[in-house]
Amino acid sequence: MTGDLIFILLALLTLVPAVWVVLSRNLVHAGFALLFTLLGAAGLYASMAADFLAVTQLMVYIGGVLVLVLFTVMMTHVPRGRENHGLDRYVPAAVFALLVFGVLYKTITAVHWHAVTPEAEPTIARIGTKVMTDYIFPFEYVSLVLLAAMIGAALLTREYRPTDTEDAPSDAGEDAEVAS
Amino acid sequence: MNVGLPHYLTVGAILFALGLFAVMSRRNAIGILMGVELMLNASNINFVAFSRYVENAVDGQVMAAFVIVLAAAEAAVALAIVLAMYRNYGTANADIAQRLKR
């Protein structure tokens, strides 16, 4: 009974702000609503005995991604109220989203899941063993992806300086003089 | 009501539909990115739910951890692109961006 109540509260904490994320005209408000959605998702992980993932969600999403999103929203200065007007985008988007949800819900209710409920136990040690044995190659590969993303983000946000290319010939000239 | 796998999957499906709606209806690139984050979280909830209701398995949780890592990398690169776009166009509106170079 208590478990049901906790699940309902966490699901509401996840879904109600998610509606606000989707519909809010002010992107800063949407960003703060996203904070509660991510918190609710972390709570759902915890209620499914995924303790490591709940903490990771808090650290990476709320501590990293959300701060990044909010900073970008504030740096790009979105004009208020100009975002999302007109039914021309809402109607097809709503129809398609409802269609996808209908298919998903139909599948969820139609399939007879052979679900068992094992005892909840700490997962950190087991996840660590899995990552270091079965998933060692994806683990190393993901570190490479992170490195590439870091370099790419730094390159993309670099200030564009046209003089960089014009300096090159004069450097070559000096080198030639030194050589002679 | 006994909370089980279908309930978590339903929450995931609703979250995915909301994210899809945001991706399709938002004009601002950051709003689209928020929708993508919602969809990634929905998929993560499904991964963890399937991992929870199978005997002695954490593979779903490992996969969800990879999704979180890739979502962070994606957010960093996407927001860098949004900033570069804002510098070139003076707006973060995804409808306007058509050129890759200046």
Image: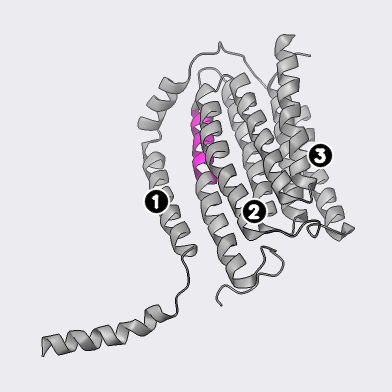
Residue stretch in magenta:
B59-71
Q: Chain of mark 2?
A: A
The residue that disc 2 covers is A73
Q: CA distance from mark 3 to mark 2?
A: 33 Å
Q: Quadrant of the N terminus of chain B?
A: top right
Q: Earlier in the sequence, mark 3 or mark 2?
A: 2
Give how far across and how far down residue A11 sits, in percent: 73, 27
Answer whether residue A168 is visible to the viewer in this image: yes
Colouring of the image: one colour
Which residue is situated farthest in the left direction here?
A180
Q: Secondary structure at mark 2?
A: helix
Q: Which residue, given by chain and number where applicable, does mark 3 sit on?
A: A102
Of the two numbered discs 1 and 3 on the same chain, state the one appearing first in sequence: 3
Marks 1 and 2: in contact by CB < 8 Å? Answer: no
Residue type for callout 1: Leu
Does the magenta stretch mainly form a helix, a strand or a loop? helix
SS at circle 3: helix
Q: Chain of mark 1?
A: A
Q: What is the distance, in whole Å, between disc 2 and disc 1 at their CAs?
A: 24 Å
